[in-house]
Amino acid sequence: MIVRFGYVAMSTVIDNASPSKTMTLKTFNGIADREAAIRKLETIAGDNLHNTLRLLRHNVGNDIQVYRFSSKLIPLATHESLSDWNPFEALREPFAAVGEYVKEHGLRVSFHPDHFTVLSTPRPEVLKSSIRDLNHHVAMFDAMGLDARAKNNIHVGGAYGDKPSAGARFRENVAALPERIKQRLTFENDDKTFNATETLELCEALGIPMVLDIHHQWVNNEGESPAELWPRILATWQTPYAQADSPVDDPLPPKIHASSPKSASDPRGHADHVIVLPLLEFLRSIAPITDRVDVMLEAKLKDGALFALMEDLARYQGDGVEILDGASVRINP
């Protein structure tokens, strides 16, 4: 099984390369000339895209093929007071440059819309803003010229005191989404509410692929091991939505999230690094039935944690681990 490792948004290795510079609404409203304020937003977004491209070059230079974009590329993009603003024409060239680089190097990229994007909500206004946010993320992929292999990963959301009703509402709301949104979706189990089994059932019902977060599963489960669920999770990556725009001879691999508990007193928090053995044990358990898997590391040290993990994995060479390059390994069952 070939395993590729990636990281989330920010680098702790490259200086001054934040893709998430922002402006508050208060600052925006404090600029008397609204057009000038909008130009400032577009300048900040242009800097974010420039830094994104810098990070992608850094990734390619270090063999990192899996990366999650910052959702904050365009400050205030979905705020209601700026609903008349379309930033994409002004940012057409930097978005296109990022997309061309992704396609040129065959990178796997994604977004993870924030926790305010909730499709299990009972509140119509929250649902409306959640769909607006998903549309915005799809629009960013479209501006990059990226097809449906680039996914938006979300959690199921809150239970609101009645988890069965919340799950049914989520299922109904997802089913009603436009196809252009659904074909880019993946669902992830969370660490407090919808566990891996419950999330998997929704993925199976809706034909949407599941991203298994093994850390979340460790702290929120029904007594099952993550490996027990893996055959069913793997099957969700064979659906039409999962493989939209993927060539038959190059299917999109399943993806998991990996991190380690921050401490015994804070088991849900993410540590700076990823402890190698629990992750390696899981990868070994799924290797007999899995050809490829991509692992998004959610450690606090970002790419620094990835490089440290590769050093740790190198110590297991000859013990079923083969280092392929700077960010991928082969796990032999």
Image (spheres, helix red, strand yellow):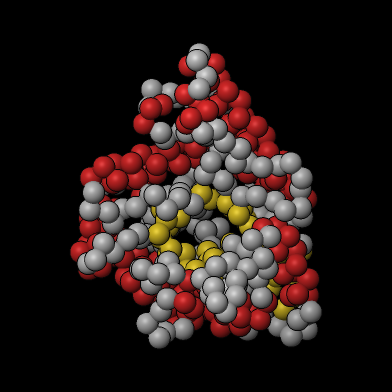
- Which of these two is toward me, 156 or 140? 156
At horizontal 22% and vertical 58% (from top left) the residue drawn is 169
Percent x, y of residue 249: 54, 58
50 sits to left or right of 285: right
Is residue 283 in view from this perspective?
Answer: no
321 sits to left or right of 20: right
238 sits to left or right of 296: left
Figure quadrant of the C terminus: bottom right
278 sits to left or right of 11: left
- Which of these two is toward me, 199 or 294? 199
Q: Residue 139: name its quadrant.
A: top left
Is residue 59 in view from this perspective?
Answer: yes
At horizontal 52% and vertical 58% (from top left) the residue drawn is 252
At horizontal 50% and vertical 57% (from top left) the residue drawn is 248
Percent x, y of residue 22: 57, 36
- Residue 161 position (above or below residue 60): below
- Which of these two is toward me, 322 or 181? 181
